[in-house]
Amino acid sequence: MSTPAQATRPKRATLLLLGLLFFTPLLLAFAIYYGSAWRPTGRTNHGVLIEPARSLPPSALPRIAASSGADSLAAADVLTGKWSLVFIGSGDCDEGCRDTLYYMRQTHLGLANLIPRVQRVFLVTAGCCDRDYLAREQPNLITLNANGAAGTALLAQFPAERRDSTIFVVDPRGNLMLRYDAHEDPRGLRNDLKKLLALSHIG
């Protein structure tokens, strides 16, 4: 006949085994994450995250009107209040520029009912501007002349490499967050924007 102490031994062994099964994966994950340089490479976003996000300075830049309109001064907070897709390039807009603006426009249109929460912005660095093309092919595009002191300060916050084929994403608080290569599948940018807009309660 077994004693009470002998009867509890199997129960303790079972509990110990269950504890090991439960805690071992956690301890292993903790050791790998904090004890090695390895990090998981999986991601859900398609663009390149700008870390840390850069707060853009308020900049009152000349707003370029369509071919029949008059130029005006844009509000200094033009890059706040909505999500902004931003392209930087020369205002005479060669074929590469037009391709990138087309990519940006089609991505915007693909947002369907979310379109009002996003604006398209073209920061012009020189050669301003092919107004007829912009009026004809890029309706509702906000075109700003950044060829001045205020524009220089603003442009300095944007990464300089491959700007001619890059679309930047600015959040409604004016923080530069992401960049996308316009040569990539536009569905990546569209899908990321939909996720951001679904999660965000601003803009």
Image (tube, grey):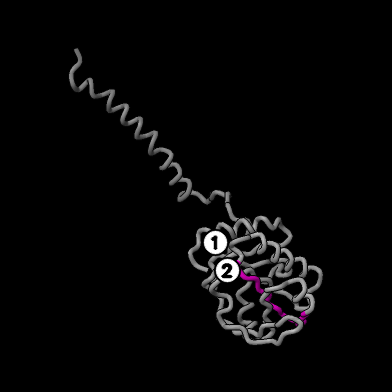
Residue to which mark 1 is pinned: 197
In the picture, measured across the screen, residue 26 lies left or right of residue 106, that is left
Q: Position of residue 54 (x, y in %)?
A: 55, 71
Asked whether residue 192 is drawn in magenta, I would say no
- Work out whether 58 lies above or below 173: below
The quarter holding residue 151 reads bottom right
Give the number of callouts. Answer: 2
- Work out whether 23 lies above or below 93: above
Label 1: few (<14), some (14–19) or many (≥20) C-alpha neighbours in 10 Å = some
Residue to which mark 2 is pinned: 83
Q: Which residue lies most toward the top here?
A: 1
Q: Nearer the viewer, residue 162 or 82?
A: 82
- Work out whether 174 lies above or below 146: above
Amino acid carrying label 2: it is Trp
**Quarter of the figure that contains the N terminus:** top left
The quarter holding residue 80 reads bottom right
Q: Residue at x 35, y 31 (%)?
A: 18
Q: Residue at x 73, y 80 (%)?
A: 66
Q: Are marks 1 and 2 in contact (CB under 8 Å)?
A: yes
Q: Nearer the viewer, residue 130 or 56?
A: 130
In the picture, measured across the screen, residue 70 lies left or right of residue 27, that is right
- Work out whether 183 lies above or below 29: below
Q: Secondary structure at mark 2?
A: strand
